[in-house]
Image (cartoon, rainbow, N blue to C red):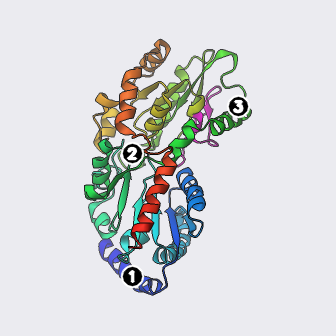
Amino acid sequence: MKKRLIGAAAFLLNCLYRIFKLLPVQKKIAYISRQSNTLSVDFRLVIREMEKRRPEYKNVTLIKMIGNGVPGKIGYCFHMLRQMYHVATSELVVLDTYCIVVSLLDQRKSLKVIQMWHALGAMKKFGYSILDKGEGTKRSVAEAMKMHRNYSYVFSSSEFCSRFFAEAFHVSMDKMVVMPLPRLDLLSDKTYVENVREKIRNRYPRLGADGRKIIVYAPTFRKEGGGFEEEELKKAAERLADSVDYERYDLVMKFHPLSGICIEHPHAVQDTEFATIDFCQLADTVILDYSAVVFEVAMLGKPMYFYAFDYDSYMKNRDVYIDFRKYAPGGITGDVKELMEMIERGKADTERLEQFRDLMISRPRGGTYTGDTADFFEKVLEAGKN
């Protein structure tokens, strides 16, 4: 029944979309995301670069999450009409998530679509890799929605990760392009880093005071109903908060923006203002689980430990692309006492961290990752003229 409804909706939308496709194509690049309601750092950096290089091109941003409830979904339907217009009249469309308009509708042959997925590197499985599994989409729905169709190119963080992205997006390897995300440039931008550190210190002046070391805990998002309960993550976070010696350490908790977890602890900080990676700039130690933040932290060279309190259930309901126990660049445990003992001993394997970084994240070809991305955009635009 659901598949037939999606098919009927797709037919009606395509009928309407044919009208939009009659409009002339403009010198325009459309950037589309439903990851958040604010422009991502990756989009912002590459747009700034493209404005310098190709001022004759208009950069249009269509950034909107699907809202909750009926009003939110109706509002997104109107937003999709804007997407249809801009997709139909752009030379290039850039995505960082699944886009209904791009994948479900019939696109003109000359349109180029680049998928630069919002997560850096391939850690936890997603897309076609987890159909009918835990947090994954049902295969019947994915097929009806033509999930991740119509991509011209898909970016990957390294050659090693390319096969994982190809599997997740169900594309052939000839569509894969090794192109790490532009935001990696900010990790080594001294002015940006110092500004971020100053803002965080002004907001939380007690962090790192009196010689205390800063621990950042950044667990991955667990989708309710996908074999996980947020209450389990909350309990695990509370156990961690209760295990920290606050005379020697400060603990900062950075849950996923979609998480509803709230930890009430007299000493631990639960921040919702700054990006996780910005806090990691200040961190002496980072505690993760299966989060893609691992790649950026590896680029920073920060000691990492993995609090895998739900390892067995996570691997059953979501799973990861790599052999986690083999490749994870730090100690793994589900016990908070053992975790804190690892941190106190400073048991970090620098060589393993560097090997992980070099395997998962390719170095820029030119001077910067943003420059490499803009180079590829220009190459695609020029090829479209021939």
Task: Locate residue 349, reporting x and y percent.
Answer: 40, 20
**Residue in the picture at 35% in, 74% down:** 6
Task: Locate residue 308, reporting x and y percent.
Answer: 39, 30
- Per the image, the residue denoted by label 1 is 14
Occupied quadrant, residue 171? bottom left
Tags 3 and 2 in contact by the CB under 8 Å rule? no
Disc nearer the start of the sequence (3/2): 2
State the extent of the magenta-drawn residues as a range. 257-279
- Foreground label between 3 and 2: 2
Res. 172 in view: yes
Main SS, magenta residues: loop
Label 2: few (<14), some (14–19) or many (≥20) C-alpha neighbours in 10 Å: many
- Per the image, the residue denoted by label 3 is 201
Between 64 and 281, the residue placed more toward the observer is: 281
Disc 3 versus disc 2: distance between alpha carbons?
32 Å
Q: Which mark is residue 157?
A: 2
**Residue in the picture at 57% in, 66% down:** 59
Q: Quadrant of the C terminus?
A: bottom left
In the rendered view, tell whether residue 79 sits above or below residue 142: below
Q: Amino acid at mark 2?
A: Ser
**Secondary structure found at label 3:** helix
Q: Quadrant of the N terminus?
A: bottom left
Disc 2 versus disc 1: distance between alpha carbons?
34 Å
